[in-house]
Image (cartoon, helix red, strand yellow):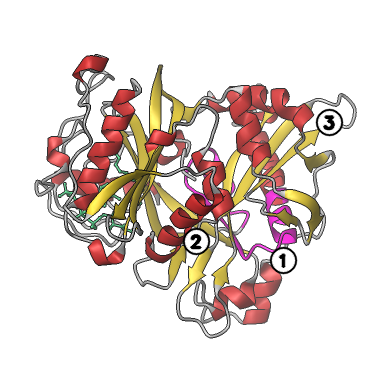
Amino acid sequence: RKAMDMMKLMDYLKGNVAMGGQKQEAGTHKFWKTQPVPQLGEEQPQEDGAIEPSQPPEQVRQDPYSLPGDFEWSTLDISNSTEAREVYELLSQNYVEDPAASFRFQYSAEFLKWALMPPGYHKEWHIGVRVKSNKKLVAFISGVPIHLRVRANLLEASEINYLCIHKKLRSKRLAPVLIKEVTRQCHLKGIFQAIYTAGVLLPTPVSTCRYFHRSLNIPKLVDVKFTYVARNSTLARMVRAHKVPSEPQLRGLREMEEKDVEAVAELAARYMKRFKMVPEFTLDEVRHNFLSGRGEGEILNGRREGQVVWAYVVEDPKSHKITDFFSFYSLPSTIMQHPKHALLEAAYLFYYGTATAFEEGAESSGRLKRRLLDLIGDALVIANEARFDVLNALTLMDNHLVLADLKFGQGDGLLNFYLYNWRTSQLEGNQALTAEQ
Ligand code: MYA
């Protein structure tokens, strides 16, 4: 399958585009051809490096880009619940949908707070556009700081996400203005590289991953047409085939706590050395990513109120060392026009790691694969306990080792990874680690 994706990617690069159901013609990217990104058909670079030089602070444009007359820029204060709610409302009505317009991402306000306010975030990178007359929020783009290692280089970069324009204002070339403005705000903070992901194909992905889905709540998923009963099967048989154990299987598995921050940071850092494009986390970032989105109060039906992230560790019962961890986050989708179900409760596999990977011969002997089957298998148990309908994962990190055995089914969606103002030759899916939330 991966070979197929690479071939499609090659076709795209040659200009014969038909990827992810998207048709585009090479050479027609009026905006992207003016930007410091690899252009279509370019040869793979011999060396890694910036495409254009960083600017000294006094050369960075000081004035905001101009917007059409009826609109104005507005910095959003995400720590303010009313403003976080405004972004939530804009996205829940206008953000990414599947090609059939059946499902639309519904990031919660708590999720947005967690994703947009990591340690060292800049409020200036949370950029809105409002209608001047009534102050209605009609567009948004955001960035957060990230230390990103791409092969041997550690980049101080921004991660751009949640670009969204109200449906009524589409195709008016407003997106390039938002992108230029967030670029300017990054430049003002001395940041000249960025990472971003998109389902759509643009010039030019550094890596392309496919979505896989592990069904948990089969009757509902069939009901909302997220999945189908195969012609040679029945609903009951499918339910049986997708049953997960009622208890985690790994001895020593427990929820991550504050006392684990250092051990998880070390394990994650060492594990991520396996991959070619990865974020590097400080202790504060580990605490933020895995503990701050945990919600409040008692766990009820596998969840706390407002919980967006689940993080678990395996503590060796004898040595009390942390040997493994996994995490996933909650990102529901609105089910459009369904009489019974309004929300698809989806969890997305996030970061994980296992010390088994550091043992001699772990990969060739199959030990790494077996350990990951146990670990991600337990992630399924926890996700099921927390009443998620489905656990989603991409073809990145070591996921390819376990997806088939754990009964993840291949999805239609692709996710393209892009770097802004950084040249490096293309990475295969499993060499990239998502920075996507
Ligand atoms: S990906 C999620 C994007 N959001 C959605 O898909 C939500 C639903 N859709 C919309 O809200 C609109 O359709 C959007 C486009 C806003 C996407 N990334 O204004 P237009 C190019 C980059 O007439 P609209 C995410 O959030 C398109 O190719 N460019 O179009 C990551 C064309 O340029 P060109 C995109 O449909 C975002 C131009 O825009 C995307 O009204 C990373 C047309 O503009 C896209 N997803 O609005 C942003 N979609 O003619 C880049 C279309 O050249 C960050 N376009 O083909 C770059 C780094 C910046 C920081 C640098 C720091 C140093």
Residue 259 locus on image (x, y percent):
78, 27
Point out the frontmost of discs 1 and 2.
Answer: 2
**In the image, residue 195 above or below residue 192:** below
Q: Is residue 236 left or right of residue 404?
A: right
- Residue at 54 percent across and 39 percent down: it is 398
- The range drawn in magenta is 378-406
On the image, numbered disc 3 is attached to which residue?
316
On the question of residue 158 being in view, the answer is: yes
**In the image, residue 321 above or below residue 394:** above
Check disc 3 and give the amino acid type. Asp
> How far apart are the two marked residues, 1 and 2, measured between alpha carbons?
27 Å
Residue 50 locus on image (x, y percent):
25, 21
- Give the SS element for disc 2: loop
Residue 164 locus on image (x, y percent):
34, 54
Residue closer to the observer: 428 or 385: 385
The crowd level at tag 1 (other Cα within 10 Å; few <14, some 14-19, many 20+) is some
- Give the SS element for disc 1: loop
What number of labels is visible? 3
Ligand 1 neighbours mark 2 (CB distance < 8 Å):
no
Residue closer to the observer: 186 or 375: 186
The crowd level at tag 3 (other Cα within 10 Å; few <14, some 14-19, many 20+) is some
- Give the SS element for disc 3: loop
Q: Is residue 203 left or right of residue 111?
A: left
Disc number placed over residue 243 in the picture, else none: 1
> How far apart are the two marked residues, 2 and 3, measured between alpha carbons?
37 Å
Check disc 1 and give the amino acid type. Lys
On the image, numbered disc 2 is attached to which residue?
106
**Are the residues tagged 1 and 3 within 8 Å (C-beta)?**
no
Residue 80 locus on image (x, y percent):
53, 46
Sequence-wise first label, 1 or 3: 1
**In the image, residue 119 above or below residue 304:** above
Point out the frontmost of discs 2 and 3.
Answer: 2
